[in-house]
Image: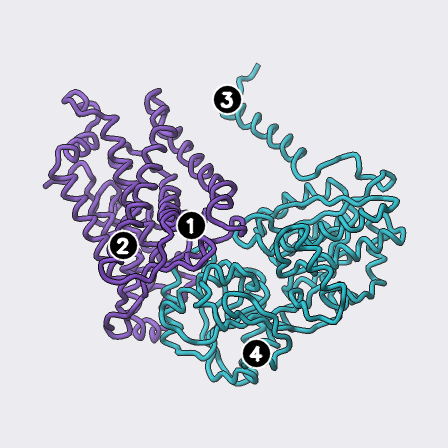
Chain colours: A purple, B cyan
Amino acid sequence: MFDDFTSSFWANTIDGMTVGSIYALVALGYTMVYGVLRLINFAHSEIFMIGTFGALATMQITGINGPFTGFALVAVLLLCLAGSMLASGGAAVALERIAYRPLRKRGASRLAALISAIGASLFLQELFATVIIPKWFAHGRGRDTLGLAQAGGEPRRLMDKEVLFSIGSGDVRNDKVLIIVAALAMMIILQLFVTRSKLGRGIRATAQDPETAVLLGVNIDRIVVVTFLIGGLMAGAAAFFFLLFYEVTSYFIGFILGIKAFTAAVLGGIGNLKGALVGGFTLGLVENYGASIFGSEWKDVIAFTILVIVLMFRPTGILGESLQRARA
Amino acid sequence: MKRVPPVMRLLAVAGAASLVLTACGGSDDKDGGSPSGGELKLAFIGAQTGPNAQLGINISNGVELAIAQYNATNPAKKVTLAKYDTKGDPAAAPAQADTLIEAEPIGIIGPAFSGESKAVVPKFEEAKIPSISPSATSTKLAANGWKYWHRVITNDDSQGAEDAKAILTQLKAKSVFLVDDNEEYSIGLAGKFVEAIKAGGVTPGTDKIDPNANDYSSTINKIKAAKPDVVFFAGYYAAGGKLLKQMRDGGVTAKFFSDDGALDQGLIDAAGAKQAEGAIISCACQSVNPTADNPAVGKFITDYKAKFNADQGTYSAEGFDVANIYLEGIKAGNDTPEKLNEYLKTVNVKGISKPIKFTETGEIEDKSIFYFLVKSGKLEFVGAADKIAS
């Protein structure tokens, strides 16, 4: 039981951090929208899913097929990252326009927006499953899970996965390092944006008190769009890293990941940017450690038990502080 | 008048609407139900959508082909097919089964998977409609005393034991790691496999994965720590593909060995051709064996390709055979579910997938297991176990 835990401790640590960075990036979308609108955007998991197809579309359209190295690799990665971030960001903004803004303008209850979110989520899943994937991505395979290796009818690979060095049982692989470092960098940039820029100040003001913010000249609609856009961009980045790491996608790929990311957001303290990071890493690590001790079928049980225990003692999550109080 | 709260009114409207919707869903014509009508109905129940849909689609295509060929001979009574999509989900299957029973078909092809079979076959028993599954292999299904249920595939006892034997004697593995995806079918198969491989003196390491999850790194790390010669995966292709991919990316070089649930191009598509190369997959079917010494097989392969513009896949031939068994019965004048069920006891045909004869419990007598290898991104039929070591 504990043999597995000790013998693969470092391997699980590295994998937990990799998957944790992806959770954290997706969790940001939940946290920011919640911080500003007090709304759980349940369609955010589909924003993530759209991001994976954005990256896939970029690869199909440009026809790039590696493996690449050096500068070519950097250029290709940035191109695909841009593709997925654009797709997710655009989808998030469109979602806000279509599914939330009309409700908000009419002063509908938060519950109505929540139903709208669930509806949008199901709509987007089925749209991809029945129209978009069969038409442009599946190449005769219907709505099956798509492997990057086979997508577009020919194998695609961006980079060769090489072990850079090992820490104990853990192989530090180039793609894992890339994901962890890039996720951390994006978090720092976002944190600076929210705490230092004028728009960021608007976001914090709206989170604190929307009515006063309006009186002080903050354009709420603009702030909400920017919030959704940032959430979408981060989900898009997560989507590309996900595709790079697991090399699979499908129309329901966002479902479990969305739940996990939402959990990470709550675990860290929803509405709190640093909380998303802490929650993401904690969840990723706890899952992998738990699975190595009790067996992988207990992974989710352990993760959610930890969540409940944390919430019992810290009802607002590990960091607990919300977006409104985040200061420079 | 008592005031009804708005929420209750809304619920009542929704309830009524759902009744109307269920009544319309699934069956295509209500009046063709009676045996005296001009048409007879067969029904397919199984996955048409959902993560493992391809297996269900393969079957229903085989069935459609058989029925189209039958109707083209201008029989006295034409046969129609209605399809009921369970998504392969035992929770979604009962509602589909109820709609199916209302349509009063005289025979059922399916359910395709074991989990959904356990959930809905009791309903078919109660309605006294014969069912033949082309693909549900869980051993426990036959132990229910069902009288209208049959299958044209041998159960997991044979497959699990044969796979264990092949791994021990052909691959000469000293250590084995077993992963299953926690489905009804997979748990049964894994149980039998463990029993058989322990009897052979090897105690496997084990782990379970969630087929809906994407990250299997904890399982991969366990496999890496155990350093097995062979990884046996009991489960369906959707999870198998992801597992295999992450195994190879994680540097695990052990042979990948799996079962009929994973016998689909989807496994290779998700894992990648390079990662899947050399994977061994067992099946109680040999439906993709164009080398069989039966001219009907070659005809089936070309007819299928012509009709669906796709190659036939796992269980297509079983679906075709099952439909043909019913059609032969109908041709012989068995036009009620009861008569058809009696007829099934007398069936003894060659079939294009395998010889078909049912036992008392509805099992098939033929127990052969065949093997497939992944070569250059395609599944290739290799035959009996002694051919896999190459």
The residue beneath circle 3 is: B5
Residue at 22% x, 43% y is A272
The residue beneath circle 1 is: A253
Label 4, residues with CA under 10 Å away: few <14, some 14-19, many ≥20: some
Q: CA distance from mark 3 to mark 1?
A: 40 Å
Q: Report x, y in % for residue B387.
A: 60, 80
Instruction: Indicate which label's residue lies in the foreground, 4 or 1.
Output: 4
Residue at 89% x, 54% y is B332
* Residue type, label 3: Pro
| Chain to which mark 4 belongs | B
* Residue type, label 2: Ser
- Secondary structure beneath dot 2 equals helix
The residue beneath circle 2 is: A21
Q: Are marks 4 and 3 on the same chain?
A: yes
Q: Report x, y in % for residue B152.
A: 72, 63
Check contact, mark 4 vs mark 2: CB within 8 A. no
Label 2, residues with CA under 10 Å away: few <14, some 14-19, many ≥20: many
| Chain to which mark 3 belongs | B
